[in-house]
Image (spheres, coloured by chain):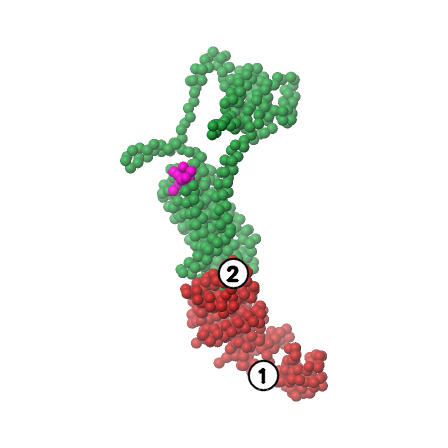
Chain colours: A red, B green
Amino acid sequence: MNIVEIDHVTKTFGTHKAVDDLSLSVPEGCIYGFIGPNGSGKSTTLRMIMRIYYPDVGSGDILVLGQNARGAANDLIGYLPEERGLYKKMKVKDALRFYAEIQGLRDYKNPVKAWLERMNLSDWADKKIETLSKGMAQKIQFISAVIAKPKLVILDEPFSGLDPVNMDVLREVVLDLRREGSTIIFSTHDMSVAEKMCDYIFMIFKGKKVLDGTLDTIKDKYGQDTILAALPDYHGKLNDLNGIENVTDLGHMQELRITPGTDSQAILTDLMKRGRVAHFELSRPSLHDIFVRIAGPEAQVSQEPSTLEEVHHA
Amino acid sequence: MRKTFVVAMREYQAAVRTKTFIITLVLMPIMMGGGVGMQLLLHDKVDTTDKHIAVVDLTGQLYIPLSSAATERNEKGIFVEEEGETKQIKPRYLIEQETPVSDNRDEMIFALSERVRNEEIFGFVIIEPDAINNSDPNPMRHAMSYYSNSPTYDDILRWIDDPINEAIQVSRMKTANLDAAIVMKATQKHRMANLGLVEKDEDGKITKAQQTNELANIIVPLGMMMLMFMTIMIGATPLVHSVLEEKMQRISEVLLGSVPPFQLMMGKLLGMVGVSMTIGTIYLVGSAVAVHFAGYGEMFPSHIVWWFLIFQALAVLMFGSLFIAVGAAVSDLKEAQNVMTPMTLVMIVPMFVWINVVKEPTSSFSTVLSLIPPFTPMLMTIRQAVPPGVPTWQPLLGVVLMLITTVGCVFVAGRIFRIGILMQGKAPSIREAMSWIVRG
């Protein structure tokens, strides 16, 4: 069963089409990652799923949990908005209690305590929100989104601005939520997080869907057109190599995109002329590279995103 | 419904737990009580320095009676007995005769003016030569004039008229061969007592008419109106900031995920109605107790307390919903202030007309104005507080009209709120706001 079903939906603000004829299905019990450049329509799509925004009149419909009731605030959906909002003057536990109650959770005492413990915030239960650091406030906001055990959790940029320790904590929690049967949709700018966590990835660019599927199907579509190479002694640039379209400097490693039809052995030979090759691997492009190919400035000129074939998951 | 209640409770607690609320609660009575206290304290701190008044009596007959009247006043009229002590509470008036030295009248007046400026005398009086004989009632021609450099200090002016006129009358009667004592007796005036109406009690006995206390008849309605104004302001105005804050901090986005917009708005409104009622009740009970212990228990308008609370709740709903709409439609405090100014003006209209309403509570002007919904809470309260009050159908009609208006306001506000609360950036134009209301 699909928990979210978006069917040819368009959303216009004034003359700007924020979301353009979008269709998407989110199966139950998965983690679905939304990626895309800033302003491409991620948050608008999430807000439409939340029914904070309605699709344009005359465009398609959105079914959430099998319903399309307009404006029905739903206790089965938890939401973490992109810009965090908490009552500054409220105490942490009062705020969580309030959010639990408006989501219809009556027995809030134990969940509040358990969640604060889990997020290492027990000592802060009686402090006011305004005294919390940004990261702590973000964790509180996260708790407020999931405290009522929603079936569907929508997280807009949940990991932005968190330190690695807190990021791990939150990631664990998200994975646990899925294990417990929730479906999670989150947007992120961090491609490695998306690669590591998501069962499905959806990319939106200029309001249109440009990628949709499992990581494997997406990568397969681009084939083994990428070389990961390490030349520890060579510090020059590699952009001038024959048969290379693009170079992404990963620090210790260079990610080279091969021009279609080029022999990778010829590239290896060229590389060896530059210096000692410590690592040479023929691979599929990283999600990061795919993202940049679609949304990068040169891609916008040479390749219209809408011409990319959509990759559907089964 | 439960969610509305949860939102209302949060709103109530958030407002009641603030320092501002507690300060308002404590400070208001202190300030009001302080005002009265200051007056009591300053009651004794009156000016008792002697006032020298020069009199140019061009009739040659009036100075002596005036001077003896002043002496009598200085001896008897300026003291009070307080705890066995005699205390002077008014200044002595020291009359001195000024003989005109120069034939030039203007020069004389100038010279006397200079003496006032040099603070040798407080003021001076000129009595024209024909003051006794001329009884021409032409108001433009003054037979007596008082000059001073203290135009707002009118105690002397009010006192000095009577003794001079009395002396003039005595003099005229003498000329006409009338016995002054007889005439005085014949023309003696009485004062009218100001009384309320009498009623029959349970035993069929006719009650004694209450002496009407004019001061109380103004202060009580005024006090009730001010209390109404204050509780409405405390209940309604914070909603602009609260909605604006939730909008700017994107709290509303989270809330709307769980609570439908209308329920969210109603929750906020009801929370503030609660805050306003809390303050209203505390003040009403407080003043009832206070007047009871001060011995004026019968002056407390207990018969209109329920009406007061009903009007207050409706007013907070009515104005509060409009303020919520403002908070949702604008995107910063400055814009909010701009929109709120005309609304606040409407709210304070009763402040400009209350004195007319107190004086003539049953005039058609007062009746009609008090039935216009935005003015009803304050003006109807005033009219009810002035004895004998108004027929019951009037506040009832007021409530009905307010209810209709309030439902309209809440409906309109609900539509603006639903769209505005998630809009960021520029505030909508009037036209856009109208289209939100119409299209929903």
User: Residue B260, how many percent across, how many down?
Assistant: 44, 62
Image: B174 above or below A123? above
Please indicate whether residue B8 sits to the left or right of residue A82 in the image.
left
Question: Is residue B211 rendered magenta in the image?
Answer: no
Residue drawn where x is 57% and y is 19% of the image: B127
- Residue named by callout 2: A127
Q: CA distance from mark 1 to mark 2?
A: 53 Å
- Residue displayed at 45% across by 13% down: B179
Q: Position of residue B155 (x, y in %)?
A: 53, 27
Going from the N terminus, do you reach mark 1 or mark 2 first? 2
Front position in the image: B234 or A32: B234
Secondary structure at numbered mark 1: loop
Q: Which residue is mark 1?
A: A223
Task: Name the image quarter holding residue B301.
Answer: top left
Depicted B303 relative to depicted B54: above or below: below
Instruction: Say yes or no: labels 1 and 2 on the same chain.
Output: yes
Identity, as a three-letter code, of the amino acid under mark 1:
Gly
When the figure is inspected, residue B333 is found, relative to residue A80, above or below; the finding is above
Q: Chain of mark 2?
A: A
Disc 2 marks a residue whose amino acid type is Lys
Residue A301 can be seen, yes or no: no
* Mark 1 vs mark 2: in front: 2
Q: Is residue B12 visible?
A: yes
Tag 1, which chain?
Answer: A
Is B297 magenta? The answer is yes
The magenta stretch is: B291-302
